[in-house]
Image (cartoon, rainbow, N blue to C red):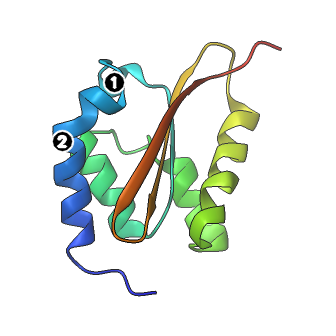
């Protein structure tokens, strides 16, 4: 699979325009947990740029990428597991994954009560 150099810019632009809809009206600052598919460093950089995230928001995604690389669709599950293992009850999260043809899927979630 080949990732076009145009993909990161398209992700950043798309997220800038769709953030409110993706987050159900919330701002990115209202989201505590970001589980983003690490399709590569440039993809994570684009998500951070498009949503205006701070430097540590995507740390879990970056750790999974560093440790395992991009495992295609399965990679998001590794990120979600790491995030949910450390989540506190009530924390708000957003999961985001990207696929061929630059499709994106997102979901909002909350840390579960123990």
Q: Are marks 1 and 2 in contact (CB under 8 Å)?
A: no
**Going by the image, does 109 lie left or right of 52?**
right
Query: 46 and 98: which one is in front?
Result: 98
Instruction: State the quadrant of the C terminus.
Output: top right
Q: Which residue is drawn at 57% across and 26% down?
A: 109
Secondary structure category for the residue under label 2: helix
In the image, residue 77 lies at what x, y percent? 67, 53
Residue 16 is tagged as 2
Residue 106 is tagged as none
In the image, residue 58 lies at what x, y percent? 46, 47
Residue 29 is tagged as 1
Q: Residue at x 49, y 62 (%)?
A: 38
Is residue 32 depicted above or below 61 in this figure? above
Is residue 42 depicted above or below 94 in this figure? below
Secondary structure category for the residue under label 1: helix
Q: Quadrant of residue 90?
A: top right
In the image, residue 113 lies at what x, y percent? 76, 12
**Going by the image, does 31 lie left or right of 80?**
left
- Residue at mark 1 to residue at mark 2: CA–CA distance: 14 Å
Is residue 15 depicted above or below 63 in this figure? above
Q: Residues within 10 Å of mark 2 (few under 14, many from 20)?
A: some
- Lower position in the chain sequence, tag 1 or tag 2: 2
**Going by the image, does 10 lie left or right of 34?**
left
């Amino acid at each position: 699979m080949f990732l076009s150099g145009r993909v990161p810019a398209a992700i950043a632009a798309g997220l800038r325009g769709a953030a409110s809809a993706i987050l159900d009206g919330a701002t990115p600052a209202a989201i505590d947990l970001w589980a983003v598919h690490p399709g590569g460093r440039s993809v994570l950089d684009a998500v951070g740029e498009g949503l205006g995230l701070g430097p540590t928001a995507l740390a879990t995604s970056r750790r999974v990428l560093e440790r395992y690389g991009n495992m295609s669709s399965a990679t998001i599950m590794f990120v979600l597991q790491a995030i949910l293992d450390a989540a506190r009850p009530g924390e708000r999260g957003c999961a985001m994954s990207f696929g061929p043809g630059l499709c994106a899927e997102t979901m909002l979630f909350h840390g579960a009560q123990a």
